[in-house]
Image (tube, coloured by chain):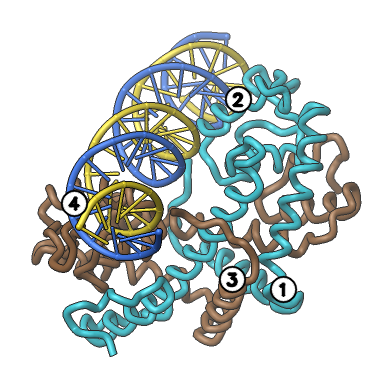
Chain colours: A cyan, B brown, C yellow, D blue
Amino acid sequence: MESVDEPGEELDFWSFVRLANDKLAKEHGFRYHLATEVVLTLNRVANIVTYDLEAAVHRPRGRSWSAFRLLFVTWLAGPLEPKRAAELTGMSRAAVSNLVKGLSSDGVLDRLPGTRDGRSVRLSLTDKGAAEMVELFRVHNEREQEWASALTDAEQRILLMLLDKLITNRAQFDVRGRN
Amino acid sequence: MESVDEPGEELDFWSFVRLANDKLAKEHGFRYHLATEVVLTLNRVANIVTYDLEAAVHRPRGRSWSAFRLLFVTWLAGPLEPKRAAELTGMSRAAVSNLVKGLSSDGVLDRLPGTRDGRSVRLSLTDKGAAEMVELFRVHNEREQEWASALTDAEQRILLMLLDKLITNRAQFDVRGRN
DNA sequence: CCAAATTAGTTAATAGATTAACTATATCTG
DNA sequence: CAGATATAGTTAATCTATTAACTAATTTGG
């Protein structure tokens, strides 16, 4: 048993979640402790996996997680406009603009004026960039597989279905997204 | 059908994931596309939910997402040391140290020398901080529930189980975490 | 029992991302 | 078609978080 004065002494994140649920329900009378647990856990898992991929795969090869995401969408969905790249990666247009500076001076990304609109820009990978992505993604994908292989294929599909369902519902209320 | 030259024209994130899987498998011969989809989706969902909670609940009340997380663990697991707060929230010790400055000057957090060790510090909420958390968490919890209610209780439990399983596996390989 | 190594916490330097403001182009409408 | 409005992209200011370096206290082991 934990002492009452020192509830934190043996906690890791997972036992904290249990403690939190307990206190929220019993001491504070909050009702939606399952929702709290879902949000806490979702965040935690996503952060751990992302941090690991960035630290194990991308930083050692000189790329940030954000740079990887931008290269990834440009690789597979490019050529594309910065605005769309921002939507697909979930970052701001300003972040894309700043990343493009570095990546094009590294010679992995091309930034050309768009054809159908005097304001627009088209981002695409250079040959060097495409070659880098093939190699980078090979390592990234191996690491993703190490993570995902904790679950069976069927479980991964269920997880995807549940995450899809969670996010699809957001049309129903006024979700705050980025500009 | 999409044109080959302009694959990005009608894409949102979800159709991008399908396109990405297709190209990764067919054009590049990558094997673990289900793993890729799991990682992409996990990240995306977590980011959307977090961004919404921060924008709808915390920023309007003058708190960042990080500040909320620190107050939350201090509220439920406190008093506790900064090092443990960093572990429970998943942020660096330096981030905790910086947040503590602001929150204690706002009068919601107390920072007292620890008893059993000359280096240690104990963080706890002030009465004002505890009152703020009760109100803040009430709103936060309502919003969490709006999100989570896209799933039935049973589905939420399955999601938690799968996320737990995913993360529990990490002992099996050399996962990179924060200091 | 003291020197070396470790640990808690803070500070410094830097990097990265956000919002807001700004420029230039495009579209809408009266 | 002219003025107002909206949109794409960049830039500026700010904020936040990170890693690394540092201080101080504690523990370890020869």
Q: Is residue A146 left or right of residue B49?
A: right
Q: Is residue B121 left or right of residue A126?
A: left
Q: Residues within 10 Å of mark 4 (few under 14, many from 20)?
A: some
Above or below for D5 versus A134: above
First along the sequence among labels 3 and 4: 4
* Element at label 3: helix
Q: Position of residue A17 (x, y in %)?
A: 38, 76
Chain letter for the residue marked with disc 2 in the picture: A
Identify residue for label 1: A157
Which amino acid does the dot numbered 2 rest on?
Gly
Which amino acid does the dot numbered 1 rest on?
Arg
Could you tell me how far apart the alpha carbons at marks 1 and 2 are, in whole angstroms?
37 Å
Q: Residues within 10 Å of mark 1 (few under 14, many from 20)?
A: some
Could you tell me how far apart the alpha carbons at marks 4 and 1 are, in whole angstroms?
42 Å
Asked whether A59 or A94 is in front, the reply is A59
Identify residue for label 2: A102
Could you tell me how far apart the alpha carbons at marks 3 and 4 are, in whole angstroms?
35 Å
Question: Residue at coordinates 52% horizontally, 80% vertically from top-left?
Answer: B156
- Kindly check if marks 1 and 3 are in contact, taking CB atoms under 8 A apart as contact: no
* Element at label 1: helix
Chain letter for the residue marked with disc 4 in the picture: B
- Kindly check if marks 2 and 4 are in contact, taking CB atoms under 8 A apart as contact: no
Question: Residue at coordinates 56% horizontally, 81% vertically from top-left?
Answer: B161
Identify residue for label 4: B103
Could you tell me how far apart the alpha carbons at marks 3 and 2 are, in whole angstroms?
36 Å
Identify residue for label 3: B171
Asked whether C11 or C16 is in front, the reply is C11
Chain letter for the residue marked with disc 1 in the picture: A
Q: Nearer the viewer, mark 1 or mark 2?
A: 2
Which amino acid does the dot numbered 4 rest on?
Leu
